[in-house]
Amino acid sequence: MTEQEQTEEKLFKDLGLSPEIQQAIDEIGFDKPSPIQAEAIPELLAGHDVIGQAQTGTGKTAAFGLPMLQYLDPANDEVQAIVLTPTRELCIQVTQALRSYAEHLDIEIVAVFGGAPIRSQQAQLRSGAHVVVATVGRMKDLISRRSLVLTAARFVVLDEADEMLDLGFIEDVERILRMCPSGRQTALFSATMPPPIKRLADTFMYDPVTISITPKTLTVDAIEQAFVEVPGRAKVDKLIEVVKEEDPEQAILFCRTKIGASRLERDLKNRGLDVKALHGDLSQGVRDGVMLAFKNHRCKLLVATDIAARGLDVDHVTHVINYDIPNSSETYVHRIGRTGRAGRTGRAITFVTPDQRRDLEQIKKDVKASISEWEKPEDRIEHARPPRRKRRGEQPAPLDDQPAVAVEEVEEFDEVVEVPLEGPGGDQPETASDDIPDAREGAVKLFVNRGSRSDITEEDLRWALREGAVLSDDQISDVRVLERFSFVEVDGDVAEKTVEFLDGTKLKGSGIRVEIARS
Ligand code: AMP
């Protein structure tokens, strides 16, 4: 049996987790540990420092979160653990995940991040926090205001360390690490290991165990992969053709350089496409705005460089287009992992110039994927159409009556069907708009794309509003859960903030979309 197969056979109960944590995992519905969890949890429980080379989507939050929670002492009111994150989105996401894992523990987890009032975060810290999940800047700020002391923080996690480096936070991270006890346990997660991160690990970690999730494990089977061979000068035209044919719900177009990304954005805009760009030449504020616009479906195409797109966790990306072929197989896997999330199918299309065919062959070999030549969707369906599944007693339909896409695909999509981009009031299923009364005066109705079918209850939504969007109970006037989606009503002045904090995050393991409902 290979090492990989052994890892896959491990069960959560083999990892040494406490009954309370096991119960939470069972309730969340995690079946088996992911590879990073199977390897990192026993090491962390044994007290070792761990470097996990893994990106979002691999289950890294539980990999560090479960052992961390297990070792906290609820009776001790000091901050015993900190998790540093590069962005507010990740900060909120990690906090929500940790809270769900700590469901049966008496552990307080507080999120502190920029862009939200510091006073309420100070108040939350004052009323007790065993774990603080923070963005770097806000943590520094709270330390300098003496609202946070780290003398008892014996468990430290650096999440997405390479992104913290990219955003220029690494010196601050080092300063924060120096304030933590020297006998602490440190876990560092990073998709890549550039030299400054290696140096940081050498300086601040004690004999760490490195766990790398290989590209093979990262590749999601649900991603169909294709390539387009095209001379450099014809790339833009070909891209426009591919985008029109594929008609993505949302797509990320990857470029290798910042200049290339700006140029492509300009070229596509000039041709009338709805596109935004995300790259390192933009300020953090602009980047946040672009990310938010993309998450909220206010733009369909995002041109991005590898570094800028890290940490972008969006569930509805149906297509990744490698406009420039990535410079390594590892980057290829990271890029295409942006689609095919949450059990959906995704497509990855890689552009190669004739002299880059060899690079493509290398990727195919490393990733062990079949990357076939791109075909227009209609041709693809013709080729791929499987025999129609016959229901009992049903005569085969004449060919002309058969659906335009394979029946299996239709059934699969039916399971994960999403409310169209227009949101409620547009193409939304009729039951919802008929059922829902107008919002109370001064309140705003928000639409959430999950309902009882995703196992979401009214209490879950109230919890998300309280904990994720930091609302008080009197700011929430109504919560209504329907089968496939829900409506919540919140005070008008906190509606935008609620969307910003909750849209694109996860609830009970499902990505949720939150938007203002159109009346
Ligand atoms: P992360 O990489 O921590 O952001 O996790 C990605 C997604 O995988 C989250 O939605 C988790 O809830 C989910 N997840 C984490 N661990 C498991 C597991 N063992 N089985 C199934 N889903 C998981």
Image: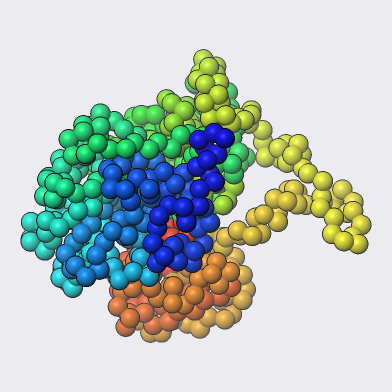
Q: Residue at x 66, y 59 (%)?
A: 414
Q: Is residue 365 visible?
A: yes
Q: Residue at x 36, y 79 (%)?
A: 476
**Whole-percent x, y for residue 387 in the image:** 82, 46
Outermost top residue:
355
**Whole-percent x, y for residue 91 in the image:** 30, 56
Q: Is residue 251 left or right of residue 474?
A: right
From this view, report whether residue 98 is shown above or below residue 228.
below
From this view, report whether residue 94 is shown above or below residue 321.
below
Q: Is residue 263 left or right of residue 281?
A: right
Q: Residue at x 18, y 55 (%)?
A: 153
Please name whichever residue, 117 or 203, is drawn nearer the observer in this view of the structure.
Answer: 203
**Whole-percent x, y for residue 367 in the image:** 53, 30
Q: Is residue 234 visible?
A: no
From this view, report whether residue 415 is shown above or below residue 85.
below
Viewport quadrant of the N terminus: top right
Quarter of the figure with residue 488: bottom left
Q: Residue at x 60, y 58 (%)?
A: 416
